[in-house]
């Protein structure tokens, strides 16, 4: 369907991804899934933006962002929320977090933490009340 191809091009213009870790928007969320996320006004905006070749679309998106900042922000927020909710992107986020170095927190005193753990004081207060 040509409209789906145009919408896919727009979505991948908004969130192109960065292979191999980050998939493009449509690799993470199929067009049909994105149609379910965008409301009627956003779909109308997307149809207006998703015309022409990639360069024309990029110019149209930049112009829309400048001329209609609130509408652009709402569209981008909806697309971004769907993207970061996609299982493949959540795996990428988790992998990135796990690969990051573990630095000691300047706010936590290791001696105090060790004392709490040694005394078995790791239960929350509501756990005590619940029984």
Image (spheres, rainbow, N blue to C red):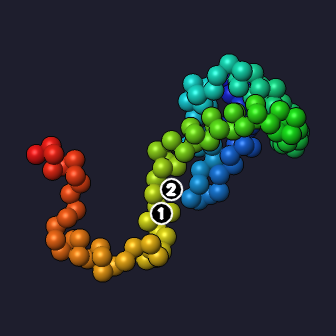
Residue 47 percent coordinates (x, y) = 77, 25
User: Residue 57 is drawn in which quadrant?
Assistant: top right
Q: Is 24 left or right of 89, judged from the image as shown?
A: right
The vertical placement of 65 against 17, above or below, is above
- Contact between labelled residues 2 and 1, with CB atoms less than 8 Å apart: yes
Residue 71 percent coordinates (x, y) = 76, 31
Q: Is 65 left or right of 103, judged from the image as shown?
A: right
Callout 2 secondary element: helix
Residue 99 percent coordinates (x, y) = 47, 69
User: Residue 63 is drawn in which quadrant?
Assistant: top right
Q: Which residue is mark 1?
A: 97
Q: Is 95 left or right of 74, judged from the image as shown?
A: left
Q: Residue at x 69, y 33 (%)?
A: 74
Say how many tags the image has. Answer: 2
53 or 110: nearer the eye? 110
Quadrant of image for the N terminus: top right
Kindly report the distance in space between the C-alpha atoms of the residues bearing marks 1 and 2.
Answer: 6 Å
**Mark on residue 93?**
2
């Amino acid at each position: 369907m040509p409209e789906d191809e145009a919408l896919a091009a727009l979505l991948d213009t908004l969130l192109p991804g960065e292979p191999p870790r980050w998939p493009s928007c449509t690799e993470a969320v199929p067009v049909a899934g994105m149609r379910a996320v965008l409301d009627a006004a956003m779909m109308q905006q997307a149809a207006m933006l998703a015309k022409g070749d990639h360069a024309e679309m990029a110019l149209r998106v930049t112009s829309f962002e400048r001329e209609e900042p609130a509408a652009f922000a709402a569209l981008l927020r909806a697309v971004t929320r769907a993207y970061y909710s996609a299982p493949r992107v959540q795996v990428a986020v988790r992998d990135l977090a796990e690969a990051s170095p573990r630095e000691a927190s300047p706010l936590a005193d290791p001696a105090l933490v060790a004392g709490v753990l040694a005394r078995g004081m790791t239960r929350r207060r509501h756990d005590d009340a619940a029984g």
